[in-house]
């Protein structure tokens, strides 16, 4: 079975490829045998980037961004 690799999840994590294997994994997560709640580096760097962006914006720029977002939600 050369060339077969384990399927990867949406964030690149290794996941079982069959239904039974996935069921066993879900049961292990539910019982606490394994943990499946780590955050990727992309999440951490995104939060850091958002904080840096917020610090450099003026209050008028923040208000304008918020106004555009509110208008987009209500359209």
Image: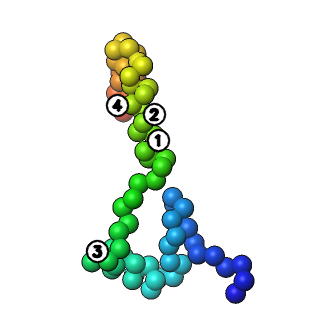
Residue visible at 40% across and 78% down in the picture: 25
Contact (Cβ within 8 Å) of mark 4 with mark 3: no
**Quadrant of residue 23 within the rendered picture:** bottom left
Quadrant where the C terminus sits is top left
Contact (Cβ within 8 Å) of mark 1 with mark 2: yes
Quadrant where the N terminus sits is bottom right
Residue 75 visible in the picture: no
Measured Cα–Cα span from mark 4 to mark 2:
27 Å
Q: Classify 63 as above or below 11.
A: above
Q: Which residue is mark 2?
A: 49
Residue 9 pos. (x, y %): 51, 65
Q: For this rendering, which residue is in front, 7 or 67? A: 7
Measured Cα–Cα span from mark 3 to mark 1:
28 Å
Residue visible at 44% across and 79% down in the picture: 22
Q: Which residue is mark 3?
A: 32
Q: Earlier in the sequence, mark 4 or mark 1?
A: 1
| Disc 2 packing (10 Å; few <14; some 14–19; many ≥20) | few
Measured Cα–Cα span from mark 3 to mark 2:
33 Å
Q: How are the colours assigned in the image?
A: rainbow
Q: Earlier in the sequence, mark 3 or mark 2?
A: 3
Tell me the tag on residue 45. 1
Q: Which residue is mark 4?
A: 74
**Quadrant of residue 32 within the rendered picture:** bottom left
Q: For this rendering, which residue is in front, 30 or 35? A: 35
Residue 37 pos. (x, y %): 36, 61
């Amino acid at each position: 079975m050369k060339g077969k690799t384990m399927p990867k999840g949406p964030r690149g994590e290794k996941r079982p490829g069959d239904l039974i294997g996935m069921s066993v994994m879900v049961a292990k997560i539910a019982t606490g045998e394994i943990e499946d709640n780590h955050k990727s580096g992309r999440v951490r760097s995104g939060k850091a980037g958002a904080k840096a962006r917020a610090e450099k914006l003026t209050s008028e720029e923040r208000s304008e961004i918020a106004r555009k977002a509110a208008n987009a939600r209500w359209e």
